[in-house]
Image (cartoon, helix red, strand yellow):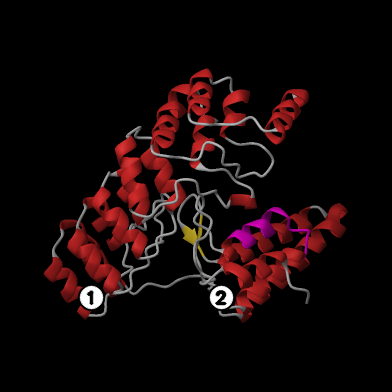
Amino acid sequence: MAESQTAATTRKSANDINARIFPETGDTLLTHTLKQAVHFASVSKYIDEVEDLLQQGADPNTLLPTKTGYITPLRKCKNLLAHYQQQLDEHPESSSLLFGLVSLYEQECEIIKNFGGVEEVQKDPAGTKQELALVKAAQKGKTQEVQNLLAQGVSPNAADERGTTALMKAAQKGQTAVLTQLLNAGADVDLRNLDGESALLLVAKNKKVNLFEQLLHAGAHDTWRALDEVANTGNTEMVKAFIKAGIDINQCSELDGNGWNVLEKNINKPLAKGNKAAVALVEAGSDVNKDCSGEGKNALYHATITNNKTILNMLKEHGAKLTPRIAQAIQNYYQRK
């Protein structure tokens, strides 16, 4: 089988194939590829990519978020298989297309199952009770109780019914000592709850500046969204503290492989919502000429097409330059309107 583009990128750049490298969604390479397979089910290359990632050690039971909770990749695959099988039974006149989709998902489900994928993640009731106790102890900063529960074998990734882990609760409440205990016990710093929140994002939302560096040192990847959250406070000093902790203020979103940075995103918002974040980012030292798209669609471009004169003037004062590439991108935008 020919090596896929996603897999090739993995071999070249990812130290941990199960890292959640897509900052806006929290996806791993596998879950991102599975979502692509859902949207482009007729393109068999995504099945090849799924198999290739699993061969490299991707976790076949990495949970996928839904509106009501989480499901495993195999359960998601089987749900889609059942859906298209029902469509095939009800619409035999479309049998050629639907039969192809059924065959595709049969193949994908079999691949995931062969690599150890399961339909349901079972929980032991007694274990669940202890996990909830750990979450509550972490939230209240009860270090001795946390230590006792961990010593009894309770997972450091214990979570409540909303998927909020003990680590997230400790981060949210600023419980530094408990945070250290859980990280030392191997807690996954990048897990997300049903609201899509990670420990780092909760730290940003609750302005627990002292914990930024600790989570980043532990390998937290949710930096793009956390920076966006901090920027939207409009507090330049908080943004600077985030940078001091090790955040790259100019980082580009990896979503779809062609994202934007936090400055570009906020300039593209309605004025009242985006200006305070943009001002905080620029005053904290954001690169006003950074172009994540590579197509001239940088901060100056977004300020121009939204007619944001306040931000335009600020960008120019901080050294923004209208290059031929940006001018062409602006021209192309108005020609399409």
- Main secondary structure found in the magenta portion: helix
> Residue 133, image x and y in percent?
21, 65
**CB atoms of marks 1 and 2 within 8 Å:** no
> Residue 111, image x and y in percent?
66, 76
Q: In which quadrant of the rendered view does residue 113 lie?
A: bottom right
Name the residue type under label 1.
Answer: Leu
| Circle 2: element type | loop
Give the answer, above or below, for where 191 lies relative to 223. Answer: below
| Distance (Cα) linking label 1 and label 2 | 27 Å
Query: Which of pointers 1 and 2 indicates the residue nearer the eye?
Result: 1
Any mark on residue 51, and which? none
Q: Which residues are magenta?
A: 32-44
Q: In which quadrant of the rendered view does residue 3 lie?
A: bottom right
Figure quadrant of the C terminus: top right
State how many labels appear.
Answer: 2
Report which residue position mark 1 lands on.
150
Report which residue position mark 2 lands on.
117
